[in-house]
């Protein structure tokens, strides 16, 4: 990824969309594995997000933009290297504000994915200054964007750019709508996991003192690291069904319903245990 800085299962909606095929559903499930990798953290989120989207919707360039409202900075990760990108980004920063589709507004299109074609025809777009000073440098004429919901002071958008004649379709919109949910969850996990990995490792015994069995405590530690059930079984020297049994018990004790929520719960609990010096901490439910 090149960076510049300026200043779970498929949903019924996706399954029954007339333009989405069974092959699309299979691809979506495989692509999700590229998103929730053990390496996922704040430093790898953009790379994982691009790998995820490449499998779903073809584009010439993928851009992951992160605006930190507190710091007043905008960072953009581009999927591919091109010498025109610094000038393109500078032109974009100068001209983007009058246009709703480029103005970093999470409420555009009700928060759902949107395309250049929702606002301007191809000919109309080529008459705009944002085309002349920015997008024209790489010939990008078809633009797709989606807001990634965050729980901090950042506004995150992901853009997909095409330079050829192919426009984005309603099939693309249906797939990107479902992808939004996963991209938001992955960012939450990446942010939490990144903060946890910068801390001193926690002894599994600390989780045991918080109300989990010794084996559940070990499973929690590996869950934070993003290990699969099969990997946990090998690391712990137990059967796969035993890992699933412990995960079910963890879900029940934590009051959560899936691995993502359990991972976020475990990271939050680890942070609170560090702050409390290992004393038993009150548990809190984390929904995802």
Image (spheres, rainbow, N blue to C red):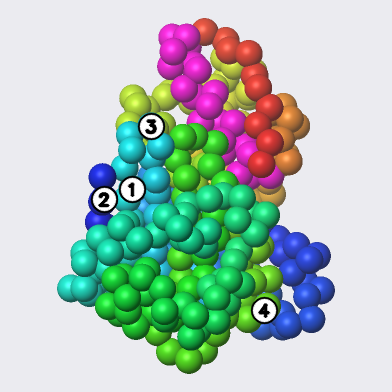
Instruction: Name the one closer to the observer, 65 or 215.
Output: 65
- Of callouts 4 and 2, the N-terminal one: 2
The residue carrying mark 2 is 6
Q: Which mark is residue 74?
A: 1
Asked if the stretch drawn in magenta spans residue 73, the answer is no
Comparing 208 with 281, the one in front is 281
- Asked whether the viewer can see residue 208, the reply is yes
Tell me if label 4 and label 1 are in contact, CB under 8 Å. no
Q: Looking at the image, which residue is at 61% across and 72% down?
A: 118
What segment carries the magenta color? 258-278
Dots 3, 4 in contact, CB < 8 A: no
Mark 2 touching mark 1, by CB under 8 A?
yes
Q: Which residue is mark 3?
A: 70
**Mark-to-mark CA distance, 4 and 2:** 33 Å
Residue at mark 4: 171
Label 4: how many Cα within 10 Å (few below 14, some 14–19, many 20+): some
Residue at point 27%, 78% (across, down): 137
> How far is mark 4 from mark 1, CA to CA?
30 Å
Q: CA distance from mark 2 to mark 1?
A: 5 Å
């Amino acid at each position: 990824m090149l960076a510049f800085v300026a200043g779970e299962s498929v949903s019924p909606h996706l399954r029954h969309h007339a333009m989405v095929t069974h092959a699309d559903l299979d691809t979506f499930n495989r692509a999700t594995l590229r998103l929730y990798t053990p390496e996922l953290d704040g430093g790898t989120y953009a790379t994982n997000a691009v790998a995820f989207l490449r499998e779903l919707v073809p584009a010439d360039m993928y851009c992951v933009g992160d605006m930190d409202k507190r710091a007043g900075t905008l960072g953009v990760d581009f999927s591919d290297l091109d010498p025109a990108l610094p000038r393109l980004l500078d032109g974009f920063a100068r001209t983007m504000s009058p246009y709703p589709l480029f103005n970093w507004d999470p409420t555009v299109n009700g928060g759902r994915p949107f395309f250049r074609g929702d606002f301007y025809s191809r000919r109309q777009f080529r008459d705009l200054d944002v085309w002349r000073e920015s997008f024209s440098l790489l010939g990008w004429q078809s633009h797709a964007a989606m807001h990634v919901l965050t729980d901090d002071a950042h506004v995150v958008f992901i853009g997909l750019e095409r330079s050829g004649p192919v426009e984005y379709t309603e099939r693309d919109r249906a797939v990107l709508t479902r992808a939004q949910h996963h991209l938001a969850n992955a960012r939450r996990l990446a942010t939490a996991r990144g903060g946890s990995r910068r801390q001193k490792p926690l002894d599994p015994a600390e989780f045991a003192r918080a109300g989990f069995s010794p084996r559940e405590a070990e499973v929690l530690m590996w869950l934070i690291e993003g290990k699969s059930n099969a990997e946990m079984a090998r690391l712990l020297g137990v059967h796969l069904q035993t890992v699933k049994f412990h995960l079910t018990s963890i879900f029940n004790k934590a009051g959560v319903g899936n691995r993502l929520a359990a991972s976020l719960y475990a990271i939050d609990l680890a942070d609170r245990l560090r702050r409390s010096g290992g004393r038993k901490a009150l548990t809190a439910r984390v929904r995802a």
